[in-house]
Amino acid sequence: MAKILTGNVTKMRTAKFKLGEVVKHRVFPFRGVVFDIDPVFNNTDEWLLSIPEEVRPHKDQQFYHLFAENTENAYIAYVSEQNLLPDTSGEPVRHPQIAEVFEKDKDGSYRPRNSALN
């Protein structure tokens, strides 16, 4: 759960996705593994303005850092919660940095290395 301060009001917000979860983009053809979560937008205005206005996300939501892939490349993506869906394909994500941060469980899901859940 993320604690968000907005003026004099504190809002508690639960992230829809968790670390190690495989997600896919709602509009664009890529998917990835969540490796970090920002409770609100934490990138540059230039980055946000580079997104076409008709699909530009609002800042007041969780943003996820992904080890992402499409059919051609592996890369790091920064995506708003409104643009992510669970990926239920069961296919592994082939990003080369995943093994540095996560290990796979018996069921094929990703678990942070050195976590208390080991």
Image (spheres, helix red, strand yellow):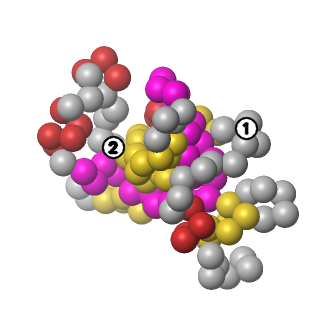
Report crowding for label 1: few under 14, some 14 to 19, many 20 or more residues within 10 A (C-alpha).
few
Residue at the right extreme of this rendering: 106
In the displayed structure image, the side of residue 77 where residue 117 appears, left or right: right
Residue stretch rendered in magenta on the structure: 19-43
Could you tell which of marks 2 and 1 lies nearer the N-terminus? 2
Query: In this figure, which residue is indicated by the disc labeled 2?
Result: 60
Q: Relative to residue 21, is residue 36 drawn left or right?
A: left
User: Looking at the image, is 99 positioned above or below residue 52?
Assistant: below
Please state the horizontal and vertical placement of residue 95, each as a whole percent of the image: 54, 53
Name the residue type under label 2: Asp
Q: Does residue 45 lie above or below 113 as drawn?
A: above
C-beta proximity under 8 Å, tags 2 and 1: no
Q: Residue at x 48, y 51 (%)?
A: 66
Q: Which mark identifies residue 17?
A: none
**Which of label 2 and label 1 is nearer to you?**
1
Question: Circle 1 is placed at which residue position?
Answer: 88
Residue at horizontal 34%, vertical 23%?
55
Whether residue 33 is in magenta: the answer is: yes
Tell me the distance, in whole angstroms, between the alpha carbons under discs 2 and 1.
27 Å
Residue 23, image x, y percentages: 59, 42
Residue at image coords 76%, 42%: 90
Q: The residue under label 1 is which amino acid type?
A: Thr
Is residue 91 located in the magenta-colored stretch of the structure? no
**Left or right of residue 68: residue 106:** right
Viewer-proximal residue, 99 or 107? 99
Image coordinates for residue 1, horizontal then vertical, percent = 53, 61
Residue 17 visible somewhere in the drawing? no
Look at the image and tell me whether residue 116 can be seen.
Answer: yes
Helix, strand or loop status at disc 1: loop
Q: Residue at x 67, y 82 (%)?
A: 116
The front one of 46 and 31 is 31
